[in-house]
Image (cartoon, rainbow, N blue to C red):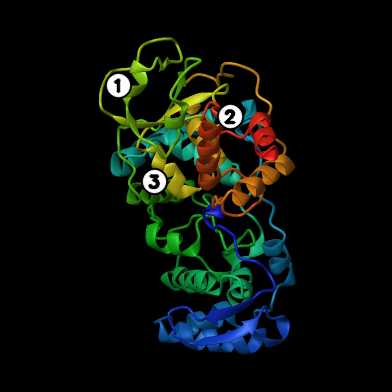
């Protein structure tokens, strides 16, 4: 899937290239195109040694050329710095709601079969479908094998992409797709749910019964394969995933994070209610309280199935949007604006905050203006230190306090 691969290495560094599963290692700076042909010949031999037939290797890899455009796209990737309000407002549009609802009705029998077999409801699948490729309309048009071979030869993440290139060959050898059919974005994702080749090989299913696992043209195959993958990473049938709630003005905010699980009874005791004001059940179901825009913004209870969203994509903004979209398709309410005005930091301000946190000794990961789990943890710690509501959300007040240290 497009966003399941995290890009964190730096270009231009000295690195070690390891051939996938083959044991061959050699040191080199990030190479240019001159050595690509020789590298490709070695990779072909390794692929054959890994059990891929010479015919498949030749058909798929003969004539491939180094692709500078793939490298440029890899080096130039932007970061995901939109707020939840911005991203969800754009992705869960009225048009996408209408299309998603129409597809649920049109494919009702297929969704019923899928849920019976894999336990994943239609709205969850349609939401991912819409966010990943606009329901199969925007899948990318780069040559998958050329992209994967180029990135396998490059120095940044060779092992990762060599593994994916081997699995792409296995997908071809199994008869699912031909080399010309394999097209997508710059990092080798394929199909209506943007599966990486390894996920394609391991989780694609032939749900329309035509003898092929076709995640490009077949909606039934694509939907069932996504459900098969979600089930494999722990999706629980007949269980909720995300639910909007109303939070009071005062809470133990330091307990509000997707990584912190509390019984429903805990939140009920502290005045959290359903959006309509009804009291939460006082049971022991473990849930996290997710505040994607801080204590004044929308609030959600994240049930165990929401953790599966975070396996699909590490971005909390993306996952909360996908899960919220699914609740809307399942009949849930429109997004609540929360308890008050919100003034998000700019990306530059967020980067400055990350830098200040790093100077205090916190490991915030890459300083990129994106609020990930490490940055949220550091923010929460500093909010507690300064006596601020510890909702893990970056604010101008926290930035000012950090600047004044």
Q: Quadrant of residue 286?
A: top left
Residue underneath mark 3? 227
The local crowd at label 2, few if under 14, some if 14 to 19, many if 20 or more residues have their Cα within 10 Å, is: many
Q: CA distance from mark 3 to mark 2?
A: 30 Å
Residue nearer the viewer, 21 or 256: 256
Which residue bears the numbered disc 2? 293
- Which label's residue is closer to the chain start, 1 or 2? 1
Q: Nearer the viewer, residue 375 or 109?
A: 375
Residue 228: x and y, percent?
Answer: 36, 50
Residue 363 seen in the figure: yes
Query: In the rendering, at what x and y percent does residue 19 appear?
Result: 50, 81
- For residue 135, say whether it is visible: no
Residue 259 appears left or right of 238: right
SS for tag 1? Answer: helix
State whether residue 33 is above or below residue 349. Answer: below
Among the two numbered marks 1 and 3 on one chain, the one whose residue lies closer to the N terminus:
3
Viewer-nearest residue: 328 or 392: 392
Q: Which residue is mark 1?
A: 265
| Viewer-proximal residue among 235 and 360 | 360
Q: How many marks?
A: 3
């Amino acid at each position: 899937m497009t966003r399941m691969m995290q890009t964190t290495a730096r270009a231009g560094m000295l690195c070690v290239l390891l051939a996938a599963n083959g044991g061959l290692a050699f040191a080199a700076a990030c190479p240019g195109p001159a050595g690509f042909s020789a590298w490709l010949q070695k990779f072909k031999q390794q692929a054959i040694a890994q059990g891929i037939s010479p015919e498949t290797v030749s058909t798929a890899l003969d004539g491939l050329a180094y692709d500078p455009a793939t490298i440029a796209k890899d080096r130039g990737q932007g970061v995901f710095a939109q707020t939840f309000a911005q991203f969800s407002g754009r992705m869960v549009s009225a048009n996408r709601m209408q299309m998603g609802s129409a597809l649920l009705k049109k494919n009702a029998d297929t969704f019923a079969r899928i849920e019976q077999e894999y336990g994943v409801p239609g709205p969850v699948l349609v939401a991912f479908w819409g966010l990943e490729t606009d329901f199969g309309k925007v899948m990318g048009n780069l040559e998958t094998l050329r992209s994967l071979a180029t990135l396998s030869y490059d120095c940044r993440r060779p092992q990762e992409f060599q593994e994916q290139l081997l699995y792409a060959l296995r997908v071809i050898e199994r008869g699912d797709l031909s080399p010309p059919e394999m097209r997508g974005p710059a990092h080798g994702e394929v199909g209506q749910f943007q599966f990486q080749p390894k996920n394609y090989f391991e989780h694609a299913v032939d749900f329309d019964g035509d003898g092929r696992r076709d995640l490009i043209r077949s909606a039934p195959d694509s939907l069932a394969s996504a459900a098969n993958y979600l089930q494999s990473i722990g999706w629980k049938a007949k269980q909720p995933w995300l639910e909007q709630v109303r939070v009071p003005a005062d809470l133990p905010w330091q307990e509000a994070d997707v990584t912190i699980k509390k019984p429903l009874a805990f939140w009920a005791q502290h005045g959290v209610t359903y959006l309509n004001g009804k009291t939460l059940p006082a049971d022991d179901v473990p849930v996290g309280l997710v505040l994607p825009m801080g204590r004044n913004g929308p609030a959600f209870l994240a049930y165990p199935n929401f953790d599966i969203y975070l396996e699909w994509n590490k971005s909390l903004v993306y996952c909360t949007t996908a899960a919220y979209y699914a609740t809307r398709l399942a009949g849930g309410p429109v997004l609540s604006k929360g308890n008050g005005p919100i003034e998000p930091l700019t990306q530059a301000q967020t980067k400055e905050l990350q830098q200040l946190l790093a100077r205090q000794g916190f490991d915030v990961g890459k300083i990129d203006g994106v609020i990930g789990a490490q940055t949220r943890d550091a923010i929460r710690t500093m909010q507690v230190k300064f006596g601020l509501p510890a909702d893990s959300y970056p604010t101008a007040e926290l930035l000012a306090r950090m600047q004044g240290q």
